[in-house]
């Protein structure tokens, strides 16, 4: 082959490759995010944007600054610069749902975190918003449709009760996603819910009624079913005060608590002042029945029966029909004053003021026979949770539940019961893949108590989303006077943290998760 022929062939090949090569991609700079102020013109479903303004780093001041505590002030001071959007949503003619969306100006992680409420709500959860936006999330919260304490906002306002019960959560999800998408010129890649107490119930409500709204839900201490819980809270207080000498005064709580620890503290191999697994605790309060004169270190026979009632399933008087699992667990005695104290729990009293349509209704008028049915019928809109979460799971949704065993407000066993019912419906294989429960020994309602109570639930969920399996353990800590003095693994229910037999009881590394 001549040199000319070789050059001709090489030229033809080069020409062919050039012809077949894909056209060069013209790189286009990503569109700049919308300005904060421009969001006031954004059209949102069932509502309107009221304001949109930039907030400088650490400069946020809540609308009611007089209520700011030290923790809240610290949270506000740590916030990055963000765009604060306020909106009003009106899905019904009687709706007035306030929503806020906080959008980090830089460092956005591409995700949305909605934060829940407590009690009867009625306010934006500003401290939780601050924590979420500081962690890099676009964050959102709602007052659920009212701005007054208690339940009287819903008397003769059924649409407002629907907003509180569930509708405001869905409307907030839709609106906040629209706001975030406009500001960042792209939808969040993950929508996460994070709440405890009422916020925990809100999480279960979303998974039940609006399975497409959120991809991941963290739900702590969820009261469920809410209407019935209101009744049994009043009933248990009535039973505690059934006779003049049946009430257990607070000065006797320490002796009763110490008696429980003597029997059940070391069941996990560690004597640390915490009952790791109350379900395994076989305690009979008769062991501290007074042998002689009454005093702070013993219980009278009537008080022994009261303690047994508190540790037992709540039953309907006369018929013995089981209404609810035990309201308080062995190990929680120091916190009995909320449900078994001198007065009934305020949230429950408020619920009856609502169904009786009487802001002045008092608990001395409570009659279980008639009021129980009244609550079941008139407040059934509050029962928003179902154990059938298959639509949520089918979308790949993940639900992380947690509950303190020493919860003084919401029965810890109600979360265990719900978890088991979900698995009965979705199948046991859903555990660890779609749903997981973590019980927290010694923790009170959402936080506090004698056990570890601080752990990063959102980070645990992020880990789950990343690798597809719920964490094999979550390390929690306890602080005294601002210094961490104990860490402990939280285990997937029904496992518990057992002491390995050597090393400090204050170090999580010396415990492993295993079945009781």
Image: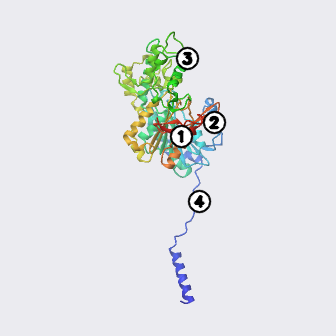
CA separation in Å, label 1 and label 2: 33 Å
Mark closer to the chain start, 1 or 2: 2
State the image quarter where residue 499 is shown: top right
Of circles 3 and 2, the one toward us is: 3
Q: Nearer the viewer, residue 3 or 41?
A: 3
> Which structural element holds mark 1?
strand
> Which structural element holds mark 3?
helix
Q: Position of residue 495 (x, y in %)?
A: 47, 37
Q: Are marks 3 and 1 in contact (CB under 8 Å)?
A: no
Q: Is residue 403 visible?
A: yes
Residue position for label 4:
29
CA separation in Å, label 4 and label 3: 69 Å
Residue position for label 3:
251
Task: Tell which residue pokes out farthest to the top in this image.
Answer: 293
Of circles 4 and 3, the one toward us is: 3
Of circles 1 and 4, the one toward us is: 1
Mark closer to the chain start, 3 or 2: 2
Q: Nearer the viewer, residue 79 or 486?
A: 486
Q: Is residue 327 left or right of residue 57?
A: left
* Residue drawn at point x = 60 percent, y = 31 percent: 64
Q: Is residue 345 visible?
A: no
CA separation in Å, label 3 and label 2: 41 Å
CA separation in Å, label 1 and label 4: 41 Å
Q: Which mark is residue 474?
A: 1
Q: Position of residue 138 (x, y in %)?
A: 56, 45
Q: Nearer the viewer, residue 267 or 450?
A: 267
């Amino acid at each position: 082959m001549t040199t000319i022929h070789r050059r001709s062939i090489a030229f033809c090949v080069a020409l062919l490759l050039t012809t077949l090569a894909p056209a060069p991609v013209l790189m286009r700079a990503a569109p700049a995010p919308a300005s904060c102020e421009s969001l006031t013109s954004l059209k949102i479903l069932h509502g309107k944007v009221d304001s949109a303004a930039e907030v400088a780093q650490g400069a946020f001041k809540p609308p009611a600054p007089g209520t700011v505590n030290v923790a809240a002030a610290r949270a506000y001071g740590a916030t990055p610069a963000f765009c604060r959007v306020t909106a009003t949503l009106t899905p019904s003619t009687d709706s007035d749902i306030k929503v806020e969306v906080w959008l980090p100006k830089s460092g956005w992680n591409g995700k949305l975190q909605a934060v829940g409420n407590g009690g009867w709500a009625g306010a934006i959860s500003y401290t939780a918003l601050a924590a979420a936006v500081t962690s890099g999330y676009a964050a959102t919260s709602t007052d659920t449709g009212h701005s007054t304490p208690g339940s009287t906002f819903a008397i003769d306002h059924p649409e407002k009760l629907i907003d509180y019960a569930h509708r405001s959560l869905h409307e907030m999800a839709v609106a906040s996603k629209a706001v975030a998408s406009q500001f960042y010129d792209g939808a969040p890649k993950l929508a996460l819910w994070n709440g405890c107490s009422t916020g925990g119930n809100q999480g279960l409500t979303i998974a039940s009624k609006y399975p497409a709204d959120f991809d991941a839900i963290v739900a702590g201490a969820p009261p469920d079913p809410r209407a019935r819980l209101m009744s049994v809270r009043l009933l248990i207080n009535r039973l505690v005060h059934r006779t003049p000498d049946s009430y257990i005064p607070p000065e006797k709580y320490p002796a009763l608590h110490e008696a429980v620890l003597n029997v059940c503290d070391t069941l996990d191999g560690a004597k640390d002042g915490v009952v790791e697994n109350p379900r395994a605790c076989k305690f009979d309060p008769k062991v501290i029945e007074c042998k002689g004169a009454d005093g702070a270190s013993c219980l009278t026979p009537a008080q022994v029966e009261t303690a047994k009632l508190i540790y037992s399933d709540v039953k309907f008087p006369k018929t013995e029909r089981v209404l609810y699992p035990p309201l308080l667990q062995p190990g929680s005695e120091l916190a009995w004053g909320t449900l078994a104290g001198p007065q009934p729990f305020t949230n429950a009293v408020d619920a009856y003021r609502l169904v009786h349509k009487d802001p002045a209704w008092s608990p001395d008028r409570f009659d279980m026979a008639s009021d129980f049915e009244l609550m079941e019928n008139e407040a059934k809109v509050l029962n928003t949770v179902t154990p059938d979460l298959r639509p949520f799971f089918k979308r790949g949704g993940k639900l992380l539940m947690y509950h303190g065993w020493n919860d003084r407000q919401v029965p810890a066993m109600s979360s265990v019961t719900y978890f088991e019912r979900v698995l009965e419906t979705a199948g046991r294989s859903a555990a660890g893949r779609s749903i997981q429960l973590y019980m927290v020994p010694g923790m009170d309602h959402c936080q506090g108590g004698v056990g570890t109570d601080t752990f990063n639930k959102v980070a645990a969920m992020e880990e789950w989303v990343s690798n597809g399996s719920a964490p094999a353990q979550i390390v929690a800590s306890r602080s005294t006077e601002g210094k961490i003095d104990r860490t402990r693994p939280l285990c997937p229910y029904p496992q518990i943290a057992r002491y390995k037999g050597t090393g400090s009881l204050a170090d999580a590394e010396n415990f492993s998760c295993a079945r009781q």
